[in-house]
Image: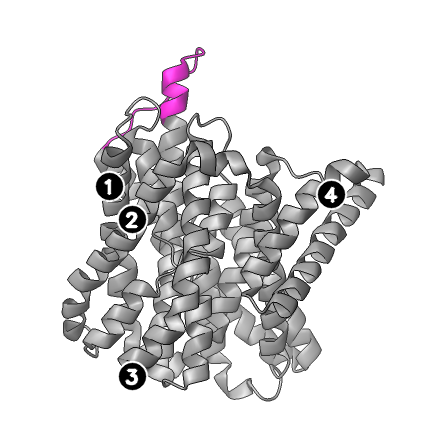
Amino acid sequence: MNEVVTIVGQALFLAVIAVVGLGFSRILKIDNALGCLLAGILAAFLLPVIDYDIGLRATSLRELVFFVILPVLIFESAWQLDPRILKRWIGPILLFSTLGLVICAFLIAAITYYGIGHSEGFPWIAALLTGSILAATDPISVVSKLRQEKTGEDLLALVEGESLFNDAAAVVLYSLVLGLATYSIVQASGAGIEAPSLSVGSVVLYFCMIFFGGITVGLILGLLTTLLILFLRTPSAALMTLVVVAFGSFYLAENIMHVSGIICVMTCAIVARACLRKQRKTYLIDAEPTWEWLGLLFTSIIFVVMGLVITLDMFTHQWLAILIATAAALGARAFSVVLVAPLTRFVGPPISKPWRLLMSWGGLRGVIAVALVLSLPVELPYWWTIQSMVFGVVLFSLLVQGTTSGRLIRKLEI
């Protein structure tokens, strides 16, 4: 019973700090993420004074991120997409979130590896982890400015859809690379454990199994969710079903079916949204507002946690690595967009040069990157270096890219 009370108290503490952060953003007229980050930093100074332990440990953050936060964020993003417009842009979106993601991740890995130039302290596997994390984009502030400028549904669908599929694929890539990193630690430690042999073919086969397996399970669950909501025929029951499915689909995919939970959640949301499009103003009338506040809550909590764990030592000791990672993230994103964009005319509508420039600069790193880096196991000797680099890139995205994207949209006359 005491454990339950402790968990509830910790959750309430994080939620209260998130609300305080939203208040900061309102007063200071800054982005919500920055306000919550500031609130988290102030809370970190306050906790020793009031002698309160919120119970956040590096060993428990992975479960919190993957089983609680990411399912809601992915489901919310997928649910917001208009199936009609998504269908028109699905070709370019898939191209950017597969080929573009791989190019971006490996470019970031190469630049950070050779830029840092310390193969013992920052090996290739650490660079690949950094690349998989920083390949995930989160253009929330860009999307809000696009809505303010009334740029049209097509550009919004392309930016939001590419970000969603990009994030889902980045999480799968991150999980795969993290598994390889853990495998290398087991091999290096010895400890009487005989690790199984790995080959390129087995890694590719495993990736395809968890990726396409996640799509299959998500498709089935999306159809079952549709049938259940049509059977229940009440808005409250439909909303409850969607919330349960958001968490349950991830748990089922990861723990029971052993496929990608993130891909499963995304596919389930897209299928259910498409099948229930005619019920949007009847049974699903409360769905959009609910997913909006749930997404805001969990996004705010992620940045509060970032504020709680961020330290000044990260910037004094790892400033060069942060600069290298920032340059790598910007350059790799721009190169991948420039390289992939001309190919989109073979799979869908062509993408104009102003749109390409906006996608390059507007590919911010945000909540997904922070969530992934917070889940890094501390057993990896380079985890703190990667966390410092990702935090630095996210701060650059919020302070520079996010604040200048509005002017870029107006200048390009999109």
Query: Closer to the N terminus: mark 3 or mark 1?
Result: 1
Q: Secondary structure at mark 1?
A: helix
Residue that numbered label 3 is attached to: 413
Residue 312 percent coordinates (x, y): 53, 38
What's the mark number on residue 46? 4
Query: Closer to the N terminus: mark 4 or mark 3?
Result: 4
The amino acid on which the numbered mark 2 sits, given as a three-letter code, is: Ala
* Residue placed most toward the observer, 211 or 61: 61
Q: Secondary structure at mark 2?
A: helix
What's the mark number on residue 111? 1
What's the mark number on residue 327? 2
- Does the magenta stretch mainly form a helix, a strand or a loop? loop
First to last magenta residue range: 184-199
Disc 4 from disc 3: Cα separation: 46 Å
Q: Are marks 4 and 3 in contact (CB under 8 Å)?
A: no
Q: Callout 1: few (<14), some (14-19), or many (20+) C-alpha neighbours within 10 Å?
A: many
- Which residue extends farthest right? 1
For the point 18% across and 77% down, which residue is it?
350
For the point 30% across and 24% down, which residue is it?
197
